[in-house]
């Protein structure tokens, strides 16, 4: 495994355009050109900025050579009743294909455990049906505790 000089940093208003470039990379399976990246710096991301401000919502990017090559989205979900402490839910973890198996996802998962400590959450939780990802998460200390059926509304 290569030892890349990766910096894990929070996604903020000032670097959001770079995060958006990474989302583009994921959805289009290709990076933006330098010209497209420069144009993207001028885009108004106010709607996204309001999402960044939600209490208990965290996004961290893996910065390498001036661009994000992966990210993790975390949500603190409060729980009341038996424990009166919440959980950290990993909403999404992605690493660019050519940067996989280089320890980046493990570094991003470490942020989930840091946020767990900061918030006093009882555990880190996620759902996946991706077998290679399950192996990664097991390496990060998670274990399969059950099976789930995913259900969601059809509302747009």
Image: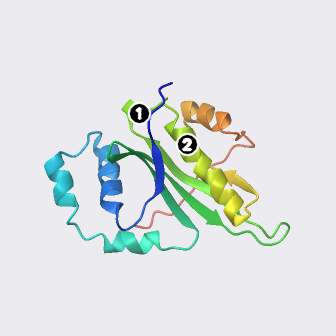
Residue 63 screen position, x and y as percent: 40, 47
x 41%, y 33%: residue = 99
Q: Tag 2's secondary structure?
A: helix
Q: How many marks?
A: 2
Point 46% across, 47% down: residue: 7
Q: Is residue 21 above or below residue 153?
A: above
Residue farthest to the right? 82
Tell me the number on the disc at residue 62. none
Q: Earlier in the sequence, mark 1 or mark 2?
A: 1
* CA distance separating discs 1 and 2: 13 Å
In the shown orientation, is residue 14 left or right of residue 134?
left
| Above-or-below relation of 2 to 22 | above
Q: Quadrant of residue 143 in the image?
A: top right
Q: Crowdedness of circle 2 by 10 Å Cα count: few (<14), some, many (20+)?
A: some
Residue at figure coordinates x 22%, y 62% from the top left: 41
Tell me whether the residue at label 1 lies in contact with that at label 2, contact meaning CB atoms closer than 8 angstroms: no
| Residue 63 seen in this snapshot | yes
Residue 14 location (% of width, % of height)? 34, 66
Which residue is labeled 1 in the image?
99
Report the front residue among 155 and 78: 78
Which residue is rendered at x = 20% and y = 66% of the image?
42
Q: Looking at the image, can residue 127 be seen?
A: no
Report the residue that reaches farthest toward the front. 5
What colour-coding does the image apply? rainbow
Give the residue furthest to the left: 35
- On residue 107, the disc is 2
- Dot 1 lies on which element? helix
Could you tell me residue 2's position as x and y percent? 47, 26
| Residue 13 horizontal/vertical position (percent) | 37, 68
Q: In which quarter of the image is residue 84?
A: bottom right
- Outermost residue to the top: 1
């Amino acid at each position: 495994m290569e030892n890349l000089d990766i910096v894990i940093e929070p996604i903020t208003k000032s670097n959001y355009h770079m995060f958006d470039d990474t989302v583009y990379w994921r959805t289009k399976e290709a990076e933006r050109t330098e010209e497209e990246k420069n144009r993207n710096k001028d885009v108004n991301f106010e709607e996204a900025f309001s999402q960044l401000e939600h209490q208990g919502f965290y996004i961290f990017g893996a910065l390498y050579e001036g661009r994000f090559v992966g990210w993790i989205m975390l949500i603190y979900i409060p729980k009341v009743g038996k424990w009166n402490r919440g959980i950290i839910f990993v909403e999404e973890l992605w690493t660019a294909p050519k940067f996989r198996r280089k320890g980046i996802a493990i570094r991003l998962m470490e942020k989930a455990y840091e946020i767990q400590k900061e918030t006093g959450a009882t555990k880190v939780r996620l759902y996946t049906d991706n077998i290679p990802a399950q192996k990664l998460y097991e390496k990060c200390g998670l274990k399969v505790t059950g099976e789930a059926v995913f259900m969601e509304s059809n509302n747009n």
